[in-house]
Image (cartoon, rainbow, N blue to C red):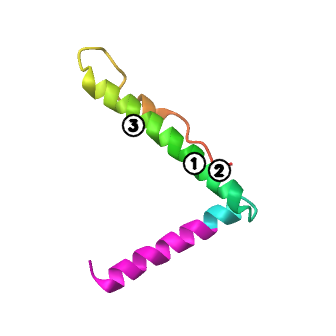
Amino acid sequence: MARSHTSSLLDQYELAIDEIVADCDGDVRGALRALMLVNEQLEQSLEWITAQLDDPSEDHQPMEFLTRRRRSLH
């Protein structure tokens, strides 16, 4: 990976971190808590998708996880 590309990615991460902390009113612990909750939701979605793929014989709604309302970080 080129150095300028790596730098650009790091800059994007820094901006994203700043936005998340700002969304949590500057509370770094709150931002971390919110990210952990989002990660847990993503893990649950992944488990659900994996279960659907493991059992294709059942009549599942494959797009159900996509149609659920997205939750904000706080």
Relative side of 69 to 33, left or right: left
Taking the image as drawn, is residue 66 in sight?
no
Q: Distance of mark 3 from mark 2, alpha carbons?
A: 20 Å
Q: Of 38 and 60, which appears nearest the observer?
A: 38
* Residue type indicated by callout 2: Arg
Question: Mark 3 highlights which residue?
Answer: 46
Q: Position of residue 39 (x, y in %)?
A: 51, 46
Question: Mark 2 highlights which residue?
Answer: 33
In primary-sequence order, the first of circles 3 and 2 is 2
* Residue type indicated by callout 3: Leu
Query: Is 67 above or below relative to 59?
Result: below
Q: Do labels 3 and 2 touch, CB within 8 Å?
A: no
Question: Mark 1 highlights which residue?
Answer: 36
In primary-sequence order, the first of circles 3 and 1 is 1
Query: Is 4 above or below relative to 18?
Result: below
Q: Distance of mark 3 from mark 1, alpha carbons?
A: 15 Å
Dominant SS of magenta comes to helix
Magenta highlight range: 1-18
Q: Nearer the viewer, mark 3 or mark 2?
A: 2
Residue found at x 60% / y 42%: 71
Q: Distance of mark 1 from mark 2, alpha carbons?
A: 5 Å
Please check the rendered image and state whether residue 16 is part of the magenta-colored stretch, yes or no. Answer: yes
Q: Secondary structure at mark 2?
A: helix
Q: Of 69 and 12, which appears nearest the observer?
A: 12
Looking at the rendering, in which quadrant would you find the N terminus? bottom left
Q: Do labels 1 and 2 touch, CB within 8 Å?
A: yes
Q: Secondary structure at mark 1?
A: helix
* Residue type indicated by callout 1: Met
Residue found at x 52% / y 41%: 40
How many residues crowd mark 1 within 10 Å: few (<14), some (14–19), many (20+)?
Answer: few
